[in-house]
Image (cartoon, rainbow, N blue to C red):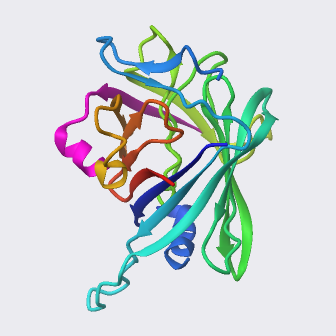
Amino acid sequence: MKKWTVYSSAVASVLVWVCLTLIITEVSQTSSVCAQDGEGGRTVKRPDWKTGDSWVVETKTRRIQVRESEPARKPARIRWRFHVRGVEPIAGRDCYRIDIECLAKGRLQPATVIWCDKKTLFLQQFQTQLATNGRYRVIQESYSVPKGMSAPVMPPVTALPIALPAFVMAGSKGMGSFTYTSQATSAGSKAPGLLRFAHTVQQDLRTPSRKRLSEAKQGLSKSLDGADVTEVKLKSTSETIVQLWKKGSPWPVYTENGCTQAWLVNE
């Protein structure tokens, strides 16, 4: 069983996800599947997850300043364990279920779960809990692409680093524009009147700069030396995410999205 640790810093999410961030501030089928650039230079091979794998995310969250006159508060650090529980069917696809457990002392919630397509690691569904009137309620969002396709997905929550790039078949183009749809319910739901939203994400791959590598080395100083690392840039109309993927790692070794920074380190 593989175990890894991630360090990150974040600020609040937007809209309905603000509640999640406020809580946080207090508290292969893999051999030929990769994202590959159009020039054939850089690739991102999808992680080889197996049931029982786990890694830990430590979020360093900048606390919200309600008034300008308030003194700046120290960032909060919260740890989360990502655990591959097994494979479950979601909307007709076999998906890895990954439970994300809050490790803050005395806190069991919010509980978060993501489901990723077993073949492509397309992020199929996301579920978390939001505090409302002193109680937690479940919030879901699911994503879809045409059968046999994949796309990067950027969930509307920045407090946890769960965005994933498109891992496409080796030899296929892994750069360019991708589209997916989202709905605020479970995957496959066909409820009448259900609103679905289309999203376009630009995915680019490149060799990371020295500056970017130096930022990532804050968490992986030794294991990044001479390693095969690819920079992935995901850009939507409202957000830009940069990830560094190291071959053989279960999660990006470094992530930043303007609100969050994350580092993957060996336990």
The residue positioned farthest toward the front in the image shown: 222
- Residue at image point 80% right, 26% down: 92
> Can residue 235 be seen in the rendering of this structure?
no
Label count reads 0
Q: Quadrant of the N terminus?
A: top right
Observer able to see residue 261: yes
Residue that appears at 31% across and 49% down: 221
Quarter of the image holding residue 89? top right
Residue 110 x %, y %: 67, 67
Left or right: 226, with 43 as reference point: left
Q: Nearer the viewer, residue 155 or 52?
A: 52
Work out whether 5 lies above or below 174. Answer: below
Which residue lies most toward the left here? 210
Q: Does the magenta-highlighted stretch encompass residue 225?
A: no
Q: Quadrant of residue 40?
A: top left
Position above or below: 186 against 6: above
Q: x, y (%) of residue 77?
A: 46, 72
Extreme residue toward the top, this view: 171
On screen, residue 205 versus residue 209, left or right, reads: right
Magenta stretch encompasses residue 201: yes
Q: Position of residue 12 (x, y in %)?
A: 44, 67
Q: Residue at x 63, y 20 (%)?
A: 146
The magenta segment: 197-216
Quarter of the image for residue 209 reads top left
In x, y percent, where is residue 178? 46, 25
